[in-house]
Amino acid sequence: MEFLKKWHSPILSVCWTMSYTKLNFFLTILGAITFLFDIGIDLWITFKYFQQELPVFGLLTIFFVLASTLIIQAFSYTWFKDDCHEDSLGKLKGILVLHIFLLGIFVRCLFVLKYGFQVNYDPKKKNCDETKKRAVEAMTDLSMLKCFKTYLESTPQLILQIYILMEHGQITVFQYASILVSVTSISWSTVDYQMSLRKSLPGTKGISVGAPMLSYVFYKLFTLTSWIVSIVFLLSCSVHLFTVLLVVLSLAGFFWAWKVKTDFCRTQRMEFLYRAVVGIILVFTFFNIKGQRTLVPISIYYVVRTLATSGILVFCFYLRPVFVNTLVFVILSIAVVGALGVGIFSLILYYACFHPSLRPLHQSKGDTVDGPTSTFRSERAEKFIMS
């Protein structure tokens, strides 16, 4: 999705494009429960690693969880600070304390549930445009943080779990549960963030349930799964090459974000962190990080992805021929090629048939009403990574 330019219509005039349904409300509750379950699974698996005398895996799990959690707290509190009014400075101190104790996601969930309950069940506020706006914006902020968590924690966890499965063959039922939770988390958070982001942007169409949503899910899920299994192959063959590949790709993503001069954050320090996170996300999947047409960047991205996947499979033949002759490698390598093909086909289908055109938005300037400019929170959604 192309980057949307800043809008200068009144705050309440864009609320008619926003909605927060009862389904959104219950999905938020389900998301909070899933988040707690995910934490429990991570803690249990970490314990099992140390119990099985696999401390490296346990420490890696702790690192992924802690690093992603700290980054999420930093962004969450910064957004609260950016949105804070002078009369709310007292509340901001309390929010800071909660973020210090790593409770930022739960604070965000409470805000979404608060406004979502008012929109759907409070007779006095359910018809208020400002309440609807707050509910959608709170949901969008939460989805952005979940998107970060997906690619900073869930995806590395999935790589680790698949690697353990391929190398050791026997893992516990909880580790299988972790793989399932990771796959589900990656798939759902990507779709959820995309749907929430579109809800919060003026005049944009959401992803329709049915073929559009399925094509988008298949595009992300299959291209991502194919790539994850591929780099697990490389990890099984050479830890050094695996590390070099991830470092090179993440640096390439970081410098691309630097080159296009992303302006998601107000401070240089947070913008640097944002670009670093974008670099990591781009290792795993494509996102449009600023206002440019996606055809050329996305084509280059998936051509490189196809060449890298093919190169990894070829490297495996030379680096570890014993592994190549196993049934697991044969089945998974066929699955990698097939998944990449299905993913790219779904990508073409989605962008050719279902991706909403933004052109009418830029041609309807005469319909906008003079008034106060949008808040930084609205601009934040416009400047986030999109598809």
Image (cartoon, helix red, strand yellow):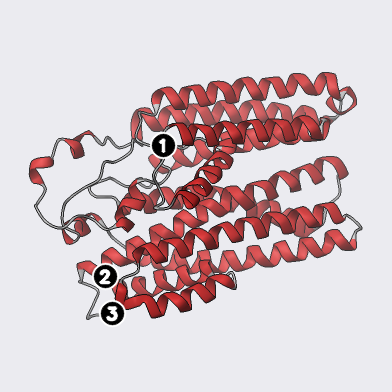
Residue 306 vs residue 141: left or right?
right
Left or right of residue 24: residue 55: right
Residue 131's disc is 2
Mark 1 → mark 2, Cα distance in angstroms? 34 Å
Which residue was labeled with disc 3?
122
Between disc 2 and disc 3, the foreground one is 2
Amino acid carrying mark 2 in the image: Thr
What residue do we see at 61% from left, 50% from top?
152
Q: Secondary structure at mark 1?
A: loop
The residue drawn where x is 24% and y is 73% is 126
**What's the distance in space between the residues labelled 2 and 3, CA to CA?**
11 Å
Q: Residues within 10 Å of mark 2 (few under 14, many from 20)?
A: some
20 or 339, nearer to the observer: 20
Provide residue 260's location: percent of width, then percent of height.
Answer: 42, 33
| Residue in view at x 39 percent, y 24 percent | 295
Tell me if label 2 and label 3 are in contact, CB under 8 Å.
no
- Check residue 261 in the rendering and tell me which mark sits there, or answer none: 1
Work out which quarter of the rendered image holds the N terminus and state it.
Answer: top left
* Element assignment for label 2: helix
Point out residue 166 in the picture as x, y percentages from the top left corner: 81, 40
> What residue appears at the point 45 percent right and 49 percent down from the top-left corner?
268
Residue 133 image point, x, y percent? 27, 63
Residue 204 visible (yes or no): yes
With respect to residue 88, does 344 lie above or below? above
Image position of 358 (left or right of 23): left
Is 226 above or below relative to 7?
above
Specify the amino acid type for callout 1. Lys
